[in-house]
Image (spheres, grey):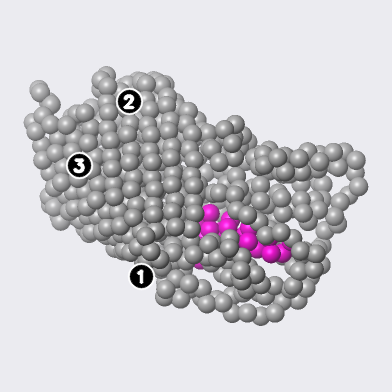
Amino acid sequence: MLFVARLLPGLTLLCAAGLHAQTSGTESLNLRIAGNLASMFPQPTGPAFVLPDELQLKPRALPPTNVPPSPPVVGGAVKPGGLVAPTFTQAVRAQSLEPESNGNAGASARSADFDKFYLQEKYPQAASEGLKLVQSGVVLTQEQRLRLANALAWTGKTDQALPYYRSLFFTPFDAAARLGLANAERWRGRQELAAPAYQQVLAVAPGNADARIGLTLASRQLRPSTVLGLGRAQDNQGLVFDNLTAMHTWRNSTGLRIYAVEARGVQSSADALPGFAPYQQAQNKSLGLRYEALDLRFAPRLHLDLQTAPDTQIFGGVRLKLTDGATYATLSRVNWGALNYSARSIAARHSATQLGLDHTSDGRWGEFALSANAYQVSDSNSLLASQIKFTPAWRPLGPGFKTFVVTDTRNAQVNTPDYWSPTSGYGTASLGVSQSWEAENWSLFASAQAGNKLYGDGGPAWSASLAGKRWLSPDYALGINATTLANRRDDAAYRASFVNVNVEKLW
């Protein structure tokens, strides 16, 4: 039987996650920290910690006009401050290449259902019904294409929404389509594409508040950023893990090459385990470099870390994008003690070779995500773990609340007191809900989940997290993340908590 892995990367991969193509930038860095540091306890906490591309709120679309002006085609480059300098050339008006309807009575009935779902703000159902119409050969009206694009984007299917927005350029729905496309690009992490798209809207509608706010949010993620973070993790087994991090991130003039440098210090301790291990203290210090090229084949992301304490070691790795969708492969040499938040493993100088695979797909029924990692540890142990998550399109608690079901596993070849290594396996299945909010100067994310045993050492488990960020000025922000969780480990009740505060400066 093949067990596949999922262990949320810890501090060792903190900057790497910050350079993820889907979450690159600094706008919701505190949410990325919450997600990546969830593994500090080390146990699978599931999607209570999600990436900021889930900050997808329904925007206010621009109303269509009967006789719109021909909008300019905007190009430009990202200036050092992160803003886009537009270059305008007047566009030629174009006519829609598609008829407005096909006159089929059955199609009209289905179209009515689609419109009804949309007007009732049942966007998952509207997106599903609209895609069914397209797949059955029904030609949507321009207004229906805008509604389908909005329904897809507002339910997280941003990649599918983009061609429908583009099909409405230079039509009476041009302004609304360009604003929708700009939002979709930002939500999927392509800030370098979102910023000029917002500029296009503002060029013909300078007073549009949504485009102005969107440009502000996108531009923040394009500007150089320095983040200082201080965090503490502790559990009921004597773990205390204090960490201090400093990271500076910037992009080149195109916005497609992302660079970062990081410094990290850790002070950790673990209580004695009678008959197994003595009291342990350990320090860990390191310097790191990060690089990601969004414009190259495979969108490679590279990281290199020089550990200076407790000894000198070099860690590093590469992540490659295998498909046009969201399938990534990772090969790394990682700091095993920092990854597992283990003072004993840090003191023992453990490292590990990591082979990982991550895949996300979005269909009619919802989003499916798989994360798998296999580790070969320097103490000759092998670990396999996995997470499979399904987020249905159906949202019974309302459009803003995402429900999900998730399974987590972890299996080890040898049990050791140095880090969590269940030889009989650990498996849980959980149900959860998450919600996110975003405004021009603040963002907030909340999530909770609860589940029970699938096999092995698994048992009743729950976790809850809250992450928020507040912009104090155009250049300074304060973020905070808090997490608490409970499960069973080594046939005993386990509790852990974490809090992190970070300050961000844009340049």
In the rendered image, residue 192 lying in the magenta stretch gets the answer yes
Q: Residue at x 66, y 56 (%)?
A: 61
Q: Badge 2, how many Cα within 10 Å: few under 14, some, many 20+?
A: many
- Tell me if label 3 and label 2 are in contact, CB under 8 Å: no
Q: Residue at x 62, y 41 (%)?
A: 363
Residue holding disc 1: 507
Residue 302 occupies which quadrant of the picture? bottom left
Residue 114 appears left or right of 193: right
Front disc: 3 or 1: 1
Residue holding disc 3: 241
> Element under label 1?
loop
Q: Amino acid at mark 1?
A: Trp
Q: Amino acid at mark 3?
A: Phe
Does residue 9 show up?
no
Quadrant including the N terminus: top left
Mark 3 → mark 1, Cα distance in angstroms = 31 Å
x, y (%) of residue 489?
Answer: 28, 24
Q: Earlier in the sequence, mark 3 or mark 1?
A: 3
Q: Residue at x 53, y 54 (%)?
A: 187
Residue 43 occupies which quadrant of the picture? top left
Magenta stretch in the rendered image = 173-193
The image's mark for residue 487 is 2
Q: Is residue 144 above or below residue 79?
A: above
x, y (%) of residue 194?
Answer: 55, 63
Mark 2 → mark 1, Cα distance in angstroms = 42 Å
